[in-house]
Image (cartoon, rainbow, N blue to C red):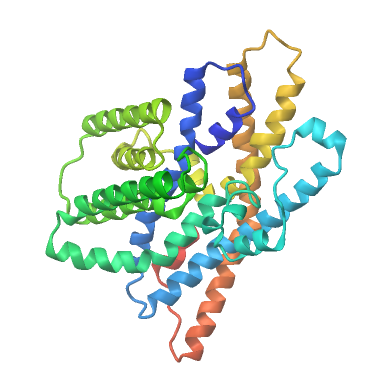
């Protein structure tokens, strides 16, 4: 979904209706947030054997995310310098990856993952870095939310459905009141207010509520019902997205639609795919590296075919999208081997040494195997 929306940005001759569908691909980030919240709950529940699970959680999350992100900072900084200083390269690959300014505040805010709160560094040091900033901000508060959920569910299971909705409504009011009447800014797509963790928080909460719901639910699978709900909710979300974009409502409705997408894949053997599973395992690397192909490579391909007017823009888009997905998939496999897994191993070493110093034996429990995937 994310690769599709970024690939489509190099095309200006495809139909508006199809382009709006491509743009909706940006909700792939919300799908990632939803699944991230779900799998974090699964991780913590499986990790119950560790007494100091807070320390374990934060260390593993940092070493899972940071090494690859730091490589991304260096990579896109280098590409930006090359493009700025080479007219020929700029004419071939376009200016899409010219980021920055790469000054000390912008770089440090990305190094320490606080760029989701700093407008100047939000999305211009690593393309798409806003979502990593939002994810890391969520990691910071997740353990407390998780414990709060466990306490509230034991008292009232209706809490599962009400809490994300209440938080959504409160944030919707707060964001629009502060944006419209205090800061006097227009709240639109792909700006600071949309990217911020507070605007995305209800999406994460839907993932946590859904996880806890599955723990207590014993309902029988109904693929037809799941399919209808997914189509209806997606249609509503796309309609809001296209006709009157609301920065808080669209992600929230999309996250609810992903519940039924999840259930479809969970209970349908027809939809199970080893390739999609592998893409899921490589999704973080693919997200970091796909901009190289979705922007410069697509720009170069479309420029090359500009004189071939008989080629349909839609066919060219499909060609570029296919090239981008599989090229990114190949690079991500290398990244997993060279960056991600060594980073995870380093996190284990650091954690084990801390535990040994505290006189606690490091336990290699199921979470360690799960984190690798």
Q: Is residue 370 visible?
A: no
View extreme (top): residue: 310
Q: Nearer the viewer, residue 138 or 175?
A: 175
Considering depth in this image, is 258 or 11 the residue closer to the camera? 11
Q: Residue 19 appears at what percent x and percent y? A: 52, 23
Answer with left or right where residue 13 lies relative to residue 179: right
Q: Point out residue 318 in the picture as x, y percentages from the top left corner.
A: 58, 23
Above/below status of 71 relative to 253: below
Q: Is residue 91 above or below residue 173?
A: above
How many tags in the picture? 0
Q: Compared with residue 61, is residue 204 higher up or lower down, i.e. above or below?
A: above
The answer to whether residue 135 is visible is yes
Of residues 171 and 324, the one nearer the viewer is 171
Residue that appears at 66% across and 54% down: 72
In this picture, residue 198 sits left or right of residue 312: left
Residue at x 37%, y 34% (from the top left corner) = 271
Q: Position of residue 147 (x, y in %)?
A: 28, 69
Q: Return the x and y of residue 132 as percentages of the image width and height.
A: 53, 54
Q: Nearer the viewer, residue 326 or 243?
A: 243
Apparent side of residue 246 relative to residue 150 in the rendered image (left or right): right
Residue 44 found in image quarter: bottom left
Q: Residue at x 54, y 32 (%)?
A: 4
Q: Quadrant of residue 330?
A: top right
The residue located at (28%, 53%) in the rendering is 167
């Amino acid at each position: 979904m994310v690769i599709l929306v970024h690939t489509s940005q190099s095309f200006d001759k495809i139909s508006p209706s199809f382009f709006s569908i491509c743009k909706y691909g940006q909700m792939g980030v919300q799908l990632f947030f939803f699944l991230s919240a779900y799998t974090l709950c699964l991780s913590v529940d499986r990790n119950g054997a560790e007494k100091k699970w807070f320390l374990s959680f934060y260390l593993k999350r940092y070493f899972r995310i940071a090494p690859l992100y730091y490589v991304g900072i260096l990579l896109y900084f280098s590409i930006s310098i090359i493009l700025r200083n080479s007219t020929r390269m700029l004419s071939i690959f376009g200016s899409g990856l010219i980021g920055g300014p790469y000054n000390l505040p912008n770089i440090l805010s990305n190094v320490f993952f606080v760029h989701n709160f700093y407008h100047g560094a939000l999305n211009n040091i690593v393309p798409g870095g806003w979502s990593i900033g939002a994810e890391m901000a969520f990691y910071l508060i997740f353990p407390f939310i998780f414990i709060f959920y466990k306490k509230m569910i034991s008292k009232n299971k209706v809490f599962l459905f009400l809490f994300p909705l209440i938080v959504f409504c409160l944030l919707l009011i707060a964001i629009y009141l502060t944006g419209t009447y205090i800061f006097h800014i227009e709240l639109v797509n792909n700006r600071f207010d949309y990217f911020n963790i507070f605007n995305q928080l209800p999406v994460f909460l839907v993932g946590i509520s859904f996880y806890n719901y599955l723990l207590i639910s014993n309902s029988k699978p109904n693929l037809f019902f799941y399919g209808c709900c997914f189509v209806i909710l997606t249609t509503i979300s796309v309609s809001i997205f296209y006709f009157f974009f609301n920065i808080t409502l669209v992600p929230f409705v999309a996250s609810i639609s992903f519940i039924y997408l999840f259930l479809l894949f969970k209970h349908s053997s027809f939809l199970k795919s080893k390739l999609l599973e592998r893409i899921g395992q490589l999704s973080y690397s693919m997200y970091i590296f796909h901009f190289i192909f979705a922007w410069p490579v697509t720009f170069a391909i479309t420029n090359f075919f500009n004189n071939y007017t008989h080629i349909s823009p839609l066919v060219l888009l499909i060609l570029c999208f296919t090239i981008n997905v599989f090229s990114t998939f190949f690079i991500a496999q290398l990244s997993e081997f060279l960056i991600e897994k060594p980073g995870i191993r380093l996190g284990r070493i650091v954690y084990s040494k801390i535990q040994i110093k505290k006189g606690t034996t490091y336990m290699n429990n199921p979470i360690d195997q799960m984190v690798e995937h």
